[in-house]
Each structure stands twice: as structure tokens, then as C-alpha cells.
Amino acid sequence: MKKGFHLSGTVTEPATTSEPAVTYKVAISFDRCKITSVTCGCGNKDIFYCAHVVALSLYRIRRPDQVKLRLPISETLFQMNRDQLQKFIQYLITAHHTEVLPTAQKLADEILSSNSEINQVNGAPDPTAGASIDDENCWHLDEEQVKEQVKLFLSQGGYYGSGKQLNSMFAKVREMLRMRDSNGARMLTLITEQFMADPRLTLWRQQGTSMTDKCRQLWDELGALWVCIILNPHCKLEEKSCWLQQLQKWNDLDVCPLEDGNYGHELPNITNALPQNASHSSDSLSRPRRTVFTRAIEGRELHWQDSHLQRIISSDIYTAPACQRESERLLFNSQGQPLWLEHVPTACARVDALRSHGYPKEALRLTVAIINTLRLQQQRQLEIYKHQKKELLQRGTTTITNLEGWVGHPLDPIGCLFLTLTEACRLNDDGYLEVSDMNESRPPVYQHVPVAAGCPNSSESYLSLAMEVALMGMGQQRVMPEGLYAQDKVCRNEEQLLSRLQELQLDDELVQTLQKQCILLLEGGPFSGLGEVIHRESVPMHTFAKYLFSALLPHDPDLSYRLALRAMRLPVLENSTSSGDTSHPHHMVSVVPSRYPRWFTLGHLESQQCELASTMLTAAKGDTLRLRTILEAIQKHIHSSSLIFKLAQDAFKIATPTDSSTDGTLLNVALELGLQVMRMTLSTLNWRRREMVRWLVTCATEVGVRALVSILQSWYTLFTPTEATSIVAATAVSHTTILRLSLDYPQREELASCARTLALQCAMKDPQSCALSALTLCEKDHIAFEAAYQIAIDAAAGGMTHSQLFTIARYMELRGYPLRAFKLASLAMSHLNLAYNQDTHPAINDVLWACALSHSLGKNELAALIPLVVKSVHCATVLSDILRRCTVTAPGLAGIPGRRSSGKLMSTDKAPLRQLLDATINAYINTTHSRLTHISPRHYGEFIEFLSKARETFLLPQDGHLQFAQFIDNLKQIYKGKKKLMLLVRERFG
């Protein structure tokens, strides 16, 4: 039922399999086509209307004839007499006595009291009669729910999709602004109050930490929305004043976030552009504090009363008058099109305000005027550069740049202009895109729409202007801002703009725009990031150039390569002057800029530089000249070994496809890049070094035998001696390589000769690590093998360890050189020292092997080795093991030519075994005393077993039993305090 300005009814939710049907009572008040209040029995707790309110509203709209229409209740009551009124009131009270009886009694008391407030006012309120024509009317907004929702989302800290929910609330604000709903500013005020009350702000400030990126982006959008509201072209002065007062209060709070992400460096204010040659070296601490609201507060100075501005936004046919006054000449270009000479981000903020407040045509007209202004500035900067070109090229650097970048700017000026233009070109567009809406399910489809404003003969479209302004903005040379957040925002904003550009289908008109703008950027001098001379701290153009290269390549390959090669530079890592030595690019290393703060995104920028190079390498496959040029650019401009290695791997993969023939030129590029990586990482620590070396050998093998020979001959500039022998040379002469390259005998011999030469050189340089590898590589050449052996012998007395010497000695025995093996084993033994308690030492096997070798050679060799063993080994169990092995078989069974074995077993009572026996018995005695010094009861059993082994050795000589008995008696006397242990000794040994 509709009664006056009040609609009421019931809405029934149908039954489901688990829930019965439910009916809700709904009441809606409205005024001048706007819903001003709602109530529903469902108890909805959301900022948006519940489904029942929507259902009742749609029912009234679609079926107005089925809704009973009644006059406002005051009109109905006016028609009743006294008896009818009394009857009406009593029935109403009876029907709802529990709800209204207290209120009815209170009102009755006040009406009967002549002095009551209610009797001082004429008439009575009527909720169904609607508001006065002078009252402000606005859509219903549940302020408490807005506060609760924002508070909840903020408390979740960006998790559980709360960031998306807050962005959708910002989008709702923009929608309200576009519908010119006064609730837009109200809702933003409520959101801002909750943002300012976020307890994390105080915590971050106290701890001196930065807020999270997600939170930072939400604050940016909040600040941009306030700029839109302050720049509303049709807001009342009192409204604007009220908003500015509130913004100033928030701005003055200590916890109010700073515009630049709490890093101190500030951008210029909204109403003043920087001079092109301004110095940026002033102390950042002296700059004024700028918060996320500062730009909106600065908007108080901006107004819309300028007559030139009004003519621009109100007419498509506004052109220069035939007779211009002197003051008007700067307001138009040579074609008579109007210009808008204002600080670019500020002018774009006006466009965003027009667009956001539902003035799309006006926004388009101002956008066209701004672009015409940018074109004129670009042309004038080009003319200035032509006069300075010779001087700047001689210097090789410039101090001229834009300190305020448009990409990454808090107001996103380029994104604003691009969206304004492309919205006018969308097919099947129901409304307007939101700036914050980045996630559409389907990519938009655009068509060319002729520009309405400007010259009547112009064939330009809004779509081509969108492409042009995006290229101008991203191609602008500007200094990298300070601070992690500001630098990260530059990268993020650039990626957003490029993703929008990639949505445009390139037709002939857009390709022409692309070509024209790329040529201007290349010729633009220091005002273009792609100009010939740029500032050392200029924001790199790699990501932008990668898009331009891919887009231009099918249409103008020469221009695309010229542009991409120009963009490869990264001046902040290069010499600041052109006089630096670039003849050895591999000696350059990645450095951190000397200024403060640093380039926090340098790693990302270097990876983008690598991506650009990889894209060019892929496209240039088969083109020798272009590949050579790209290689030179990589060697000159990329300073990270890991990134060059990645490029080398990419080039290798592209050059050696599985389904087609190998590209030799690109393969050589991969090899050269690999060689550069080897030189760069030769003297530095790199955890991927071994992988890099193996890959290089694989690449050289793929290139061919000449490449392998080359890296073997120049190994000292590329590899360590260990790498050269164990990986490079070993792989080069392997059976697998010979088969892979189908080498003939001369080629195999050449490779083997190079490998032997390398092996000897490496063994001389690092014998400890390379002697064994050198012997292995020289096996098939007697002279080289002898030379390698001599190097090993000469080095043995020096820094070689017993482990290295034993390894070489074993190798010599395996190769059939037992006497040489014995010599090396003797040298190794002299380097060894095995203590009494080192019965698990890794060298024990080597010692046993050496003794077995000397025993097999004969009595003389064994006699020569035993003094070394006695001197080096003090572990009783090891000595007894050696002694036992030497008495099992007769010496001299190795079958050395010219020697005969007697076949007799050796006696422990005679030399050389007597010396070993005495040393073993002494070792047992010393070890026993050492163990008894700190023995615990839980080791008693183990100790008794140790004495049993000792007895076996003691009993070897004829008087051994007497010697052992005396030894046991001594133990009983010395350690008689260890009664339990000595009892165990008596039980076992008497």
C-alpha cells in the first residue's frame, strides 16, 4: 500500500528444502524520486538495501496499478469528526496496545498540559506527507552500517578480500558522485573517519614502520576521491568550506599518513609546476609535511569561473577568434584549438572531477585541450633540444629533466585522461568505467569515435588520442622518486597503463599514432625518457619499450629495434660520463647509487631490462646484424651476471628448438653471453657458478669443436683450475662429446692435446686440487703423464694434504704404478697424525691400504714404511690391525719384475715388525692409562674388552705373557681405588 510518500507491504521468501517460507514487513519513505529511509523485518546489516526492499520497490515501479494509493494520513484524519477520531485512536491503541500504549499515554499527558512543548507548535508531524520543498532530499544511507563495515574491513588488515570490499565502497562513492547524489561526500566522510581511527596508524608511527602496500593504495584512493569532491564544479561554497575544515582537522593529526609513504621526499603542490631546470638536491627535511589530504586542501585555490575554461568545457566548436588580443594568443595553438595552460596533474584532476560528477562531455572537451597543450609543449621542447643538442651530446649527460613524473603520480593524471578518452569509445557501454575497477571479466571492445572538439577537418579519434597521451606520459623523462613506496608505485602505475594499452586492437590509425609518437620520443632530447641524452637518475624505460617494440615490430621493424636498443640503458649503474672505459663491459659490476635514499626497486628494473633484451633476441633470430647489435647492447648495459646468464640460456633455447634446425648466429650470441658471465663471476662468489660452467660447456659443444678448443685454450680467463680440469676438460674429451660432434681422429687429438695442456697448467697453478685430474687427462700421453706425476711429487712436500696424496697414490696403483703409489703413500703418511682415541678416523682405511701396498712390494718397502707408521699413528687398535695383517701372508707378493719373494712369513721378534710390535704395545699401555683417568662405571665392560684385545698383542712375543701379567699388576696397584673395575679385571685376567 502506498500512503502519501510512504510505501509499505509484505515480501515473502519462498520455502526451500531446508527452510519454510518467511514473510517480512517492509516500509519505505521516499521524496522526489529518492528513497529516503527504509525498514525491514529481516534485520539487514549492510550499507546496501536488502533484497526485500528492492523487491517492494520494483513491484511498485513495475505494477503501479496493483498498489493501493492513499492520501497522506494527515489528510485522512482531517476528514474525520470527533467521534471518528476517538474511535480511530482507540482501535489503533487496542490493536497495538503493548507497543504504543506508553507512548499514547505520554502524548495525551503533554496535549492536556497547556505549558507543554507539544502545544507550542502548530500542527503535527506526518511521516507520509513528505518533506518541504526547501528541505534537502537525499537517498537513504545507513551511516552506522557504513562505519561498522569499514571498521570490520580495516580490522582484517587486507585479508579475506577486505581490500576488494573497501575498493567496492570507493567505487560506490564514485557512482554516487556521478549520479550527483549528496550521499557521496557523506559516505566518503564516514569512510575517512574510520580510516583515521584505525589503531594501526598509531602503532606504525610509534614503531617507525611503513604501512602495508594494500593499505597504502587504499589511502591513495581516499586522497584522490577527496580531490574529486573538492573540485566538484557545481558544489556550494558552504559545502566546500565544510569539507575543507574537516580535511584540515584530519591533516593536522600526527597519525595522518604522508603522501609519499612516510619517506620525507615531497612532490610539488597541486597548483604549481616545477621549472624544468629546478635543482632537486635541497634537504628533504626542510620540505613541508604533505599528507594524503594535502592535494585536496590545495584544491581550495582552484575554481571553475575562468571564462576560457568555461568555454572549453561547454562547447565543441570553441576556437580562436578571428581577431585575437595579445593576451589570447597563448590560449590557442596554431590551428585555433583551445589550450589549457595549467600544471598537468592539476588539469587532469579537473578532468577526473568532471568525469566523476557526471559531466562526461565536459571532461572530454577539457581532455582534448590538455592533450593539445601537451603536444605544443612537446614540439617546443624538441625545438629547444635542437639548439642544445651538440653541447649535450658532447657532455653525454644532462641535468635537465622533469622532477615530477606523471606515471606514479598520486593523482594518476595519465590514467585519468586515458580512461576518459577510452570510455567515449566503448561499444555496448552501459555506463562509465571506475578508476578503481581493474578486474573486468571481459576485455572491453573499442571503436574509433571522431573528436567533436577542435578543427572541423580533423580526422582524429578519441581512441588515437588515448594512445597518444599514454605514450607521452610513459615516455616522459623524470627523476626516480625517493622511497620504496613511491618507486614501487611508478612500476605499478606503468604496468596498469600498459595493460590498458594492450586492450586496444592496433589498426592503421593507431599504428600511425604509435609510429609518430615513437619518433618524437626518440628525437625528444632530455625531455623524453627515450631521448639521446638523459639524466643519470632518470626512470628507466625498459617495460615501456618492451611494449612499444612488440607493438611496432610487425609494422616498422627498424623503428622498433632502434627504440628498444635506445631503451636498454640503465644510467644509474653506468658511468656518468661518456669518457669511461667501455671496452671491457664484463668488468662492470652492479652498484647501488651513491645518493640517499637508494633505488629500492633496482632489482625489478634490472629484470625488466633483461626481459626487453630477451624479447629482442627472440625476435631477431636469423638476423645476424641485429643479433650482433643486441649482443653489444647487452654487454654494455646489463651489469648483473645472473641476468646475463638468464639471457644466455634464453638465447640457447631459442637457437636450438627441438622441431627445427639450429640458428648458428643466435647460438654464438648465447656462447658470448655465457663467456661474459664466466669472466664476471670468476673472482666473485656465486652459488650458481657450477651450474653456469656446466651450461657453458654444453653451449660450446653445441656450437662446435672450435668453440671447445677456444675455451680450453683461454681457460685462465674463464675458469678456476678446478673447474677447468674437473668439468670443462673432462667433458670436452668425454665419449659423449665425441659422439655428439661426430669428431674424426685429428679433431679428437686436437681436443685431447688442448685438454692435456690445460691439465698441466692447472696442476702447476693449483696442484692440491688439480693433480689427480691432470693425471687422468694425461693418461694416454706418456710425456704429459710423467710431467703431471712430477708436479704431484713436487707439490707433495708443500701444501698437499694426506687425503689428497693418498687419493693420487691409489690412482697410481690402479694405473699399474705400485712403486710410484708407494712413494706417494709414504709422503702422505708423513703428513698424518692419528691420536690414540681416533679409532674411527677417515684416514684409517688409507693407512691400512698403504701398509698392504708396502707389504705386497716386499720387505724393504715395508721396512721403510713402518717407521713412518709408528711416528704418525698412535691408535693402538689401528696398529694392532696393521701388525696382524703383516703376519698373515709373506711379503713381496705383488710380482714386481726382477724381484723374488721368499714365501716366508715375517716374525714379530725381528725387524721390521718388532718396531711395530713395540709401538703397538706402548700404544695399548698409554691408551689404557688415558682411558682409566676419566672412566665411568657404564664403560667398564667396554674397557675389559679393550684389555682382551691388548692381551692378544702382548702375547705375540715369547715373553709376552709375563709382560702382560706385569702390566695387569701395575694397573691393580695404581687404580686400586676403582674396586669394582679391578674386581672385573681379576675375574677376567687373574
Image (cartoon, grey):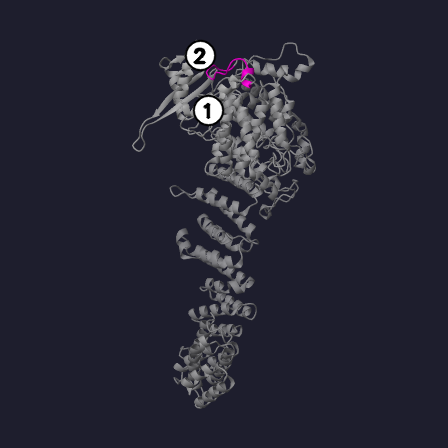
Identified by mark 1, the residue type is Pro
Q: Quadrant of the C terminus?
A: bottom left
- Which residue is identified by label 1? 102
Main SS, magenta region, reads: loop
Residue 31 location, x and y as percent? 48, 16
Q: Which mark is residue 610?
A: none
Identified by mark 2, the residue type is Leu
Q: Quadrant of the N terminus?
A: top left
- Which residue is identified by label 2? 77
Q: Which range is magenta? A: 116-131
Assign a secondary structure to mark 2: helix
Residue in the picture at 49% in, 40% down: 614
933 vs 964, nearest the viewer:
933
Residue in the picture at 45% in, 55% down: 732
Question: Label 2: few (<14), some or many (≥20) within 10 Å?
Answer: few
The image shows a total of numbered marks equal to 2
The answer to whether any part of residue 53 appears in the image is no
Tell me if residue 127 is in the magenta stretch.
yes
824 vs 147, nearest the viewer:
147
Question: Label 1: few (<14), some or many (≥20) within 10 Å?
Answer: few
The vertical placement of 554 against 706, above or below, is: above
The answer to whether any part of residue 734 appears in the image is yes
Residue 887 location, x and y as percent? 41, 82
